[in-house]
């Protein structure tokens, strides 16, 4: 792997939102990247970053407020402006609408776009990437470049809940195959952005509905767990049924998961599969990758979001309470940080992989 | 049905706890019952009720603090003392340990014990009763009296979560049969009693473990949905797999439920089954019974615990978000009040049924 | 007092918001009033009420969802439209901007406007009214009619926090005079409307700032506790210093209050002043008035918002923990419901007083 | 200052509680200290640390669970046992009862006891110490040794709320003198230990009472802000009136403070006093001391507990919203971490000072 010799200029689209702020905080301390532009909506362009939004991250664990970019002037989110500044990698925290319009334009202008938006995730020529799980899917970006005739490319990370679920499922799919997955989620409010969920709606409450979320869980894991055939993907055969709930938690999605395996296995087999799994990129030493991306908890009352979600700067996914399921084969609990592992950290890790694999020249 | 002509003297065991207080609040305004004794643990016997515990119920919806019994002296929880006071019905909010010892003693002394404790729920000669669901199971109390040679009897209400689940399942079992049920719960802190869950454990958190809860959900619904054969019960054939979580909610358990039916049905069929169901006791006019014990919500984001749990003084069970399940047949959300429908209100309704059916002479 | 013989037609401005919904819920069950129109912003006019907003009130304590008006079509908030429908009394839950424009227009068109908005509260000819405290200030409405040449009039209720504070101060001002008041508030999120406070801002947090709130507390109580001179008001001489904080509570503002009295008094004197106070309208029997508008708690850990705020449908104000203050004379805790006593219930009680006093002909 | 050349052996009394765990977490990474014994109550002695309690600290910010001491056997909290192990410094997280008995015994046996307990704080010969504020008070320990004839000594840190308040007051006392202080607190649940506050008591609630807390705030700051006369203390003349409330926050006490100064000053003067204050030990370079122990926030809605409390591992105290007070002179908001700055971190900083000053030989 070639570690970049000089910092690589990057830009952040949608820098003022909850995920945008996470991007800025991570990039401010990133060993490979150097932020050359923060971009926001038309009406915020030109404002100082610290005037256009309120920094919502705790000081201690996230370093300087505004990542030290408080005085930076926000840019317009156009390829002309940002690529002109030298940004060869663009991280997108855009909403679906702007993403639909802007992300392809950036790729057409030569930028590599690493997007947290849902707009293009299920497009046939767009890699939906969790490096530990399906690093080889990144090859799809070359197909995309060929098909679209672009120098840049668009790479998506999955929905935050789908990220946690897929990382928990990957060892099982690899070891035993998965036929059925049922999941009920306990989702944090930060998953809805800012201002997002009104406090009147969630204090002391549980809301049994999150728009479009169950649909994403039904389709994204199958794409990510699918097989790369050299020029296209064959989705995995698993069926996913999801029920998504909002709970009064700040950060971190907890999942109650039940699975039916394709091949029979004991609880010890499953436990061993979780414990031994290291993912596909352990040897690459990517800055945002963990030696053990999956943590198996032994204590029966773990993982707990308050105690575990910030482990490894929010990049670890936790599983625990593995036990037999009276209806399917096994059930367990999973947990991950929706805004780090499930959003900003995810996109940045994807960019690191693209560099390490040489798709982007350092 | 014979409405009692004179108030029937009743006692409450474990009156100082969360469920005990709910018993007292409901009984203080009950048209049939008259509280003659509140009993508590040995160390509280003799104290005023308002000195022995702190009343935890909101004033508005629960009437007078301490149900107006603040100055009453707590009694020892022994048959001698309470039956001597004329209490022919005893409501038990005891913990399992004391319940194991005391409840049979009360029944042997001629009292009818309506218990919220788990100690005897699965005993073969003990009715596990939700009147709307399995009123005919009350006949088991006569078997019990014969077998044990007691004039009194012991009748249990189910675990709070099992109550909500079973009321939601009953229309489906009756209409289509159920083969498999998967449920993930979002349980309120009041389900753990007082002081119960430490605030340090649950503020902003989700705890993926509640001791012994999943086991109760696996066995209690099958007993309740079982068929009364005239002298014994044949449990229903359904399998239940439960995953139980604690969330920062005060009162009310929310359930994410998925089911596989024994006979095929459309979503409209299931909706109609929920809507038309009135339960087995609609015609009896019991004071704590509802004309519609089950409320089907049309709005996609309902039921919500904060908005719906107190409906009908906490005796309604709510279902909503009915939709197809990609793995089993259907999934939906259910909600009920753990401390009312799932505890105090449940036991009181059971006693009302026993009176209306003439097992207890008014 | 003349109880209206026929229901009086009323309209609600700003019916879709948090306070608007409280108005609708109270008016739907009001013995004197009959809702003939719900009005909302231009873009919602014409829509069904249940399509234009989500009903945020718990079912049990607030009756039918949408007060039974779910199918009603929202009206434009113009005098032509509403006065044309016969609405002689208009309750305003408007924001400041629209209130500035619309409320005088309604009064000019012959309507009596009972407003929860802050726009006109401090105007010299506008009564700022809490009937129990300063019923006689309502006479200012006649001055207003004369000055402005209107048949209708504009009557304001105070800021929600100022309402709770002023009701707690009134007995002390009457009995001993007040020279200094210091108050720190713990304010519920519903005070900020809907969507109002983002959950990301308040879950597990305390926010030490509420825009414009401290200013209102500094000036409104002095106006209300002032003396009616027959044609104008002389404000009370008390100084108020307020510090306002938002806390993760749904409904109900808690106040930590310290006072310096003008005349010396013992703690027992103060306690007696609280206990004996009944306010100025006890004999009128107004539907929304309480026999005892102020509840003095003896228990050292009361009042508590969760347990006490809904007492008397949210119209009671609670005081407790009275004790000497090492710096000023006494300190105590106060509590009241911001959206009922401090908003919708307040305006409705004001209208009841105007009817009972004959300013509005029934 | 002499930095210890070899790690100094220390023990922790009451290691299983909330504050005990904070001690262990901090000491596990401390450059000067080496934990040789964790002690607990009689019934836990002999158990593994990870069996005797549940580690309540988030993994990320607090390193290894149990500070890496999970397998350590808990010791009995007796001088024989612990001093025998070489512990020359003992950190006490004991409750008042055990502290009264054990802490003097340890001092008599030659140990220096740095205690978070309230038992001896107000004793005339016991230093009540916040190094930045009153480092010179540590000299009182020599008086204590002389009076009591001990080789060891007992040094207390103040109550958690008093710590935050006193650090915020110190710059004002030094610059202008303080005559009156009024404070209302918003206290986190961790201040009550574990299990401490029941979730049923605090979810969605504000509790206006914390036993003995207001009394501590009335007396401790005056002792700490007092003048060291060479052989005794003269307490500061300020009067403190406190009102203490519990709110649903995990860690961190927020204070609403109003002050009357002895000498007149402008808001700018006060602001400058806060900003320029560095405390008495800035030059010592103690491991737990901060270059700026007090952080003055400019943003009107800061400090906020969720965003600011963990700054500098919980050792910073924050002030903000400085403004004039209509009754006293100025008011402002303050914030600090009750379990770090107000407990474990406080005692450890005290020990560091005693070492640096040479009272304890390294």
Image: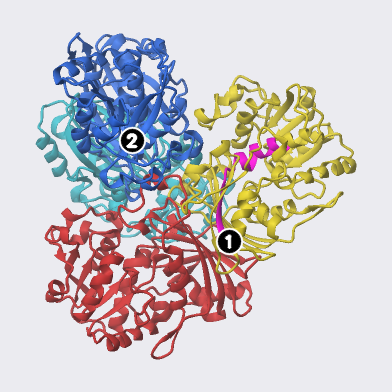
Chain colours: A cyan, B blue, C yellow, D red
Q: Is residue A293 above or below residue B113?
A: below
Q: Secondary structure at mark 1?
A: helix
Q: Position of residue C7 (x, y in %)?
A: 73, 23
Q: Is residue D344 magenta?
A: no
Considering the image in quadrants, where does the C terminus of chain B appear? Answer: top left
Q: Chain of mark 2?
A: B
Q: Is residue A117 visible?
A: yes
Q: Position of residue D162 (x, y in %)?
A: 43, 68
Give the residues in magenta: C330-350
Q: Which mark is residue C267?
A: 1
Q: Is residue B289 above or below residue D181?
A: above
Q: Position of residue B260 (x, y in %)?
A: 26, 17
Q: Is A234 in front, or is B350?
A: B350
Q: Chain of mark 1?
A: C
Q: Is A294 in front, or is B297?
A: B297
Q: Position of residue B105 (x, y in %)?
A: 20, 30
- Disc 1 and disc 2 in contact, CB within 8 angstroms: no
Residue labelled with disc 2 = B187
Q: Is residue C348 magenta?
A: yes
Disc 1 with disc 2 on a shared chain: no
**Residue in view at x 28 percent, y 66 percent:** D97
Is residue C340 rendered to the left or right of residue D44?
right
Q: Secondary structure at mark 2?
A: strand
Extreme residue toward the front, this view? B84
Considering the image in quadrants, where does the N terminus of chain B appear? Answer: top left
């Amino acid at each position: 792997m070639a570690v970049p010799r000089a910092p690589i200029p990057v830009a952040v689209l949608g820098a003022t939102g909850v995920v945008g702020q996470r991007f800025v905080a991570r990039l401010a301390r990133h060993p490979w990247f150097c932020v050359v532009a923060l971009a926001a909506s038309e009406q915020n362009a030109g404002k100082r970053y610290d005037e256009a939004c309120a920094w919502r991250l705790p000081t201690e664990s996230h370093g300087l407020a505004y990542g030290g970019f408080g005085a930076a002037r926000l840019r317009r989110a156009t390829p002309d402006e940002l690529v002109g500044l030298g940004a060869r990698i663009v991280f997108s925290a855009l909403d679906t609408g702007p993403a639909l319009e802007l992300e392809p334009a950036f790729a057409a202008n030569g930028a590599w776009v690493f997007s947290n938006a849902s707009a293009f995730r299920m497009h046939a020529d767009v890699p939906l990437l969790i490096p530990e799980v399906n690093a080889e899917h990144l090859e799809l970006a070359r197909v995309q470049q060929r098909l679209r005739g672009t120098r840049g490319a668009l790479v998506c990370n999955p929905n935050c809940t789908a990220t946690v679920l897929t990382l928990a499922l990957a060892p099982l799919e690899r070891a035993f195959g998965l036929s059925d997955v049922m999941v009920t989620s306990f989702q944090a409010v930060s998953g809805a952005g800012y201002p997002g969920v009104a406090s009147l709606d969630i204090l002391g409450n549980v809301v049994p509905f999150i728009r479009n979320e169950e649909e994403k869980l039904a389709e994204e894991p199958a794409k990510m767990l699918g097989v790369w055939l050299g020029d296209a993907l064959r989705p995995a055969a698993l069926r996913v049924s999801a029920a998504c709930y909002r709970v009064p938690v700040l950060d971190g999605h907890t999942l109650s998961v039940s699975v039916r395996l394709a091949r029979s296995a004991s609880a010890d087999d499953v436990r061993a599969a979780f414990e031994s799994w290291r993912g596909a990129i352990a040897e690459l030493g990517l800055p945002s990758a963990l030696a053990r991306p999956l943590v198996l908890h032994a204590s029966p009352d773990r993982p707990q979001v308050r105690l575990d979600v910030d482990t490894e700067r929010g990049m670890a996914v936790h599983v625990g309470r593995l036990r037999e399921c009276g209806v399917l084969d096994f059930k367990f609990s999973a947990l991950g940080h929706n805004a780090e592992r499930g959003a900003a950290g995810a996109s940045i890790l994807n960019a690191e992989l693209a560099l390490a694999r040489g798709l982007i020249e350092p």
